[in-house]
Image: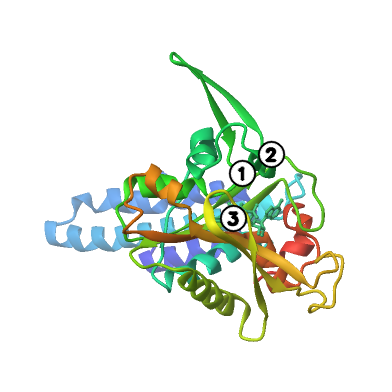
């Protein structure tokens, strides 16, 4: 039989195969050792060399195109068989779309806050969540027994090594990082510290026991309270836009002197007074002040030469004000109906 005729016949037969068994029979018939192609290849061994080469090449071409056709037919028969198999799974169906995740609104807010401070020349650093009593309290001018410890009731960790027990805790604020940074850096210092903090306290619409802060610290020559206010007003403008109101009031933190807190007019009631702002029209977003000289001298800074400001900003409060969220607990309930609303 002519090689091309054989090929046409074989391909037509292949089309007719309906299942894997039929396909195997086809393979034995056309590509098997006793099949016409093998016989043809055997028969040309007596031909003169040049003729044998030409015939051999054409026969091998036909053989390899039949092998390719066999392979693709096998694949489609196999797919057809699986798709109608007893498992009931139809693997020919298109895949289900993978749900795309997104950043948690608190992560987004962290990033926006850090970007605002970075645009003013602050560097971002991070620190430990399990902290020594020393950094969380003592180095911040809150010695053991100081009444200000009551402002920050927290969770304690028992830690003992061969030199005895050391008080450790889940940090109540990001302020310990002020001390850690200053211990390692000579002024000028300009850092912000995003992180998680912990307090043993009851939750309500604006308080959580686990929440997030961004600490800020700037130390240099000639830094004044005006620099603190200017920096925080500018960041408030970047985060909230031009038309929100900000308010500074004096308050007390042992590690600053003087101390202030900053509030933004309530996003819920626009200053009228509601549940979220406890009827005041304002929501406190941060505590701040001029770094206390005791804190500066403890890390070896020359307090005659250097002054600084520090602040600790509540990230959830900022997110609530920006998005008009009336309950802080919504952030941590993992309810996708809530979380999907953000970007
Ligand atoms: C502090 O934590 C000080 N470390 C801030 C500070 C830093 C003062 C540097 C001076 C210099 P305070 O406890 O007020 O301060 O918390 C700071 C901010 O965190 C608050 O303004 C508020 O926005 C937020 N915050 C405080 N407690 C909670 C809470 N339980 N849940 C959610 N946010 C809170």
Ligand 1 closer than 8 Å to the CB at disc 1?
yes
Asked if residue 311 can be seen in this view, the reply is no
In this view, the residue in front, 150 or 120, is 150
- Rendered image quadrant of residue 119: bottom left
Determine crowd level at label 2: few under 14, some 14-19, many 20+ residues with C-alpha closer than 10 A. Answer: some
Of mark 3 and mark 1, the one earlier in the sequence is 1
CA separation in Å, label 1 and label 2: 8 Å
- Rendered image quadrant of residue 283: bottom right
Residue 153 is tagged as 2
Residue drawn at 33 percent across, 50 percent down: 301
Contact? badges 1 and 2 (CB < 8 Å): yes
Find the residue positioned furthest to the front.
Answer: 304
Position of the N terminus, as image quadrant, is bottom left
SS label for mark 1: loop
The location of residue 191, given as percent across then percent down, is 42, 59
SS label for mark 2: loop
Residue 213 is tagged as 3
SS label for mark 3: strand
Residue drawn at 61 percent across, 46 percent down: 197
Position of the C terminus, as image quadrant, is bottom right
The location of residue 132, given as percent across then percent down, is 51, 34
Find the residue positioned furthest to the left.
Answer: 49
The residue that disc 1 covers is 172
């Amino acid at each position: 039989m002519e090689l091309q005729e054989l090929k046409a016949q074989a391909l037509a037969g292949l089309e007719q195969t309906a299942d894997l068994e039929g396909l195997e029979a086809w393979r034995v018939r056309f590509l098997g050792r006793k099949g016409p192609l093998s016989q043809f290849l055997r028969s040309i061994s007596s031909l003169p060399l040049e003729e044998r080469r030409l015939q051999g090449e054409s026969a091998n071409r036909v053989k390899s195109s039949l092998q390719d056709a066999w392979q693709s037919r096998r694949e489609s028969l196999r797919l057809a068989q699986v798709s109608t198999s007893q498992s009931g799974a139809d693997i020919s169906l298109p895949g289900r779309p993978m749900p795309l995740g997104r950043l948690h609104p608190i992560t987004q807010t962290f990033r926006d806050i850090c970007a605002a401070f970075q645009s003013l020349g602050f560097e971002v650093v991070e620190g430990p969540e399990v902290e020594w009593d020393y950094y969380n309290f003592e180095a911040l001018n809150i010695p053991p027994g100081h009444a200000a410890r009551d402002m920050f009731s927290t969770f304690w960790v028992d830690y003992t090594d061969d030199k005895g027990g050391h008080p450790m805790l889940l940090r109540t604020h990001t302020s310990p990082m002020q001390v850690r940074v200053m211990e390692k850096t000579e002024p000028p210092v300009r850092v912000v510290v995003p992180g998680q903090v912990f307090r043993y306290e009851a939750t309500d619409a604006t308080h959580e026991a686990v929440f997030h802060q961004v600490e800020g610290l700037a130390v240099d020559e000639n830094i004044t309270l005006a620099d603190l206010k200017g920096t925080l007003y500018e960041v408030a403008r970047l985060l909230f836009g031009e038309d929100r109101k900000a308010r500074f009031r004096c308050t007390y933190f042992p590690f600053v002197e003087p101390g202030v807190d900053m509030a933004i007019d309530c996003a819920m009631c626009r200053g009228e007074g509601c549940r979220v702002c406890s009827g005041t029209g304002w929501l406190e977003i941060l505590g701040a002040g001029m770094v206390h000289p005791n804190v500066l001298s403890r890390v070896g800074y020359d307090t005659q030469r250097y002054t600084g400001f520090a602040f600790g900003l509540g990230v959830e409060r900022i997110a609530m004000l920006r998005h008009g969220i009336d309950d802080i607990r919504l952030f941590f309930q993992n309810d996708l109906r809530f979380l999907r609303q953000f970007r």
